[in-house]
Image (cartoon, coloured by chain):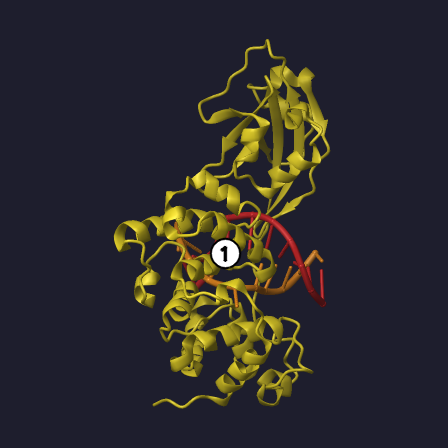
Chain colours: A yellow, B red, C orange
Amino acid sequence: MSTIHPFSEQLVSWYEKNARDLPWRQTNDPYLIWLSEVILQQTRVAQGLPYFEKFKENFPTVFDLAAAPENVLLRHWQGLGYYSRARNLQKTAKIVVEQFKGFFPKSYQELIKLPGIGPYSAAAISSFAFGEPHAVVDGNVFRILARYFGIEVDIADSKNRKIFEKLANDLLIKSQAAKFNQSIMEFGSLQCSPSPNCDGCPIKIGCFAFLNGKVNSLPVKTNKVKILSRFFNYFVIEKNNKILVKKRANKDIWEGLYEFYLIETESVLSLQEILLNDKKIAFFANFTNELPAPKPHQLSHQKIYSKAFHVQIPDNFEFELGGEYEWKSAIELEELGKPVLIGNLITDNFQLPVFNS
DNA sequence: AATACGGGGAA
DNA sequence: TTCCCAGTATT
């Protein structure tokens, strides 16, 4: 039998004294474990927590989730970001219902085939729900292992992932896979955080980074994300107490979410300049007034500079756009999944007559 | 192997 | 501002 590394023992010991009481730790239900893991992908516990409670309440079983309209799911996901998670959530729910009679597969190899479940989530679900011996490797694990064992390779380079996976699996206490995985992530979150609490650290005496003054330089992570600037001009077109909206298409941000009539430009333009290139609503320039500009909206790979206009078209005027546009009342609009930028735009201009109905 | 994909909290 | 969070899918 493999021996247990002192590091692992100390981690679990620390966890038993310091673990937070989180709702997904109070269940063995693979559905709830899976739901929590997807919600928590690249998402802080504090941000994901209310979403987990809401989804658990609204979709108590995988059958409920599989049966929900995608729009409803996206509306509930609103504000959490990375919306492909919500779409993949339903794809997987349907597969589990239709191919597995509602039972999640138990093995890492089967789980990782499901949409939205990658190496981390497959390890997490298989260990938390089924006790399978697979070590999780998330941002916490990269950080702890790099610091404690002095691994100075670039964690942004995907070819280095297997170094950490091998080490994590060597350290894994196979008879207590779930607890070990919880322990290492909790330790990374509370103790060995990006700016760590080394003073109170119970294992600093064995930590390479602590002993060598490299706590602040490990893990090594190159960051080369380039931010694209985009300029969105939104027109809240109102007629007969309804608003024109459109569902965003594939291959771009906010896929599947709803927004107002959009004219994207290459730079910041005035209303007159924007309308110069638009045949559809230019006629209504006299019925258009500018709303306070939203703050620049920062995404992981894009920065959205936006302007917003309200177009009040008289009821007796003829005006229609193509089939992909839909007229929605304020009530209906509330039920649609929208980007935070759009949600803020609505909230900030709540005085609009249509939103008071 | 690189890049796209949200939003927010902490330093 | 910058970093980065219980990462995954696509190219």
Please provide percent x and percent y for residue A271.
Answer: 68, 25
Please provide percent x and percent y for residue A314.
Answer: 63, 13
Q: How many marks?
A: 1
**Quarter of the image that includes the N terminus of chain A:** bottom left
Q: Nearer the viewer, residue A59 or A116?
A: A59
**Quarter of the image that includes the C terminus of chain A:** top right
Q: Quadrant of residue A291?
A: top right
Q: Quadrant of residue C2?
A: bottom right
Please provide percent x and percent y for residue A334.
Answer: 57, 34
Q: Label 1 is found on which chain of the structure?
A: A
Q: Secondary structure at mark 1?
A: helix
Looking at the image, residue A198 sits to the left or right of residue A82; the answer is: right
Q: Is residue A194 above or below residue A252?
A: below
Q: Nearer the viewer, residue A322 or B4?
A: A322
| Point 55% across, 58% down: residue | A43
Crowding near the residue tagged with mark 1, few <14, some 14–19, many ≥20 C-alpha atoms within 10 Å: many
User: Mark 1 sits on what residue?
Assistant: A39
Q: Nearer the viewer, residue A224 or A56?
A: A56
The single residue placed furthest to the top in the displayed view is: A316
Q: Is residue A12 above or below residue A109?
A: below
Q: Amino acid at mark 1?
A: Ile
Q: Judge whether residue A225 can be spotted in this image.
A: no
Please provide percent x and percent y for residue A203.
Answer: 59, 86
Q: Judge whether residue A263 can be spotted in this image.
A: yes
Looking at the image, residue A207 sits to the left or right of residue A121; the answer is: right
Q: Is residue A264 above or below residue A5?
A: above
Q: Nearer the viewer, residue A195 or A216?
A: A195
